[in-house]
Image (cartoon, rainbow, N blue to C red):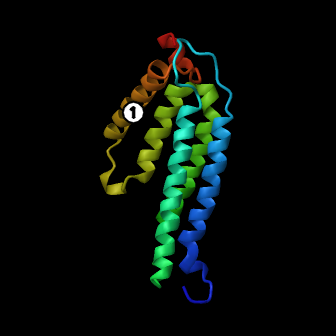
Amino acid sequence: MSAKKFSFAKSRDLILGVVLLALGIAYTIMARNLKTRPKLVPSYANSQIVPTLLGILLIILSCALIWQAVRKLQAGGEAEGKKMSKDDLISVLLTFAIMVLYIILLPELGFILSTMIFLFVQITILAPREKRNLLLFAIVAVVFTAIAFVAFRIGLTQLLPRGPIEALLGF
């Protein structure tokens, strides 16, 4: 690669890849240091397994982004230059806001209720206005939450934040 002028627009994928790689490594290290809770039944799975797998996935995808960006820069590729629309920016900000609310409400509402609400709202935000089907979104949120609850509570024998629904179900 010749000594060309550095441009953020041309190198943004490379920069993003390096930042995400650093975050992935830090996240994986923190995930491996999570304290585990007592298990209901003996098993090899613990509270570190899913965060560790997600951290490893982030590292792999970051490396793929870096590799792709380097190849693009070597080929002299230009940045796409696509600007974010106002609707896309609003979607990003709303997504961030509901993620923060989810984290705040999780201990109070419990896993089931807070996850169902989060998924329903998130799907509604991301769906195009002309294709919004609130009944379908509610069904998806309930079914996915039930699957995740069974997977963590029964499959991985992990305790999840309790709320009113878990109390009614006896979990």
* The N terminus, quarter of image: bottom right
- Disc 1 secondary structure class: helix
Tell which of 149 and 13 is nearer to you: 13
Q: Measuring 49% from the left and 67% from the top, which residue is drawn there?
A: 67
Task: Residue 101 in the image: state x and y as whole percent.
Answer: 61, 40
Q: Write down the quadrant of residue 154 in the picture.
A: top left
Tell which of 98 and 147 is nearer to you: 147
Q: Measuring 63% from the left and 61% from the top, which residue is drawn there?
A: 19
Residue 83 showing in the rendered view: no
On screen, residue 51 above or below 78: above
Q: How many marks?
A: 1
Q: Measuring 48% from the left and 25% from the top, which residue is drawn there?
A: 152
List the residue tagged with mark 1: 144
Residue 31 showing in the rendered view: yes
Task: Residue 164 in the image: state x and y as whole percent.
Answer: 55, 18
On screen, residue 47 above or below 59: above
Q: Measuring 45% from the left and 51% from the top, which residue is drawn there?
A: 125
On screen, residue 144 above or below 168: below
Task: Residue 42 in the image: state x and y as whole percent.
Answer: 53, 13
Tell me the amino acid under the disc marked 1: Phe
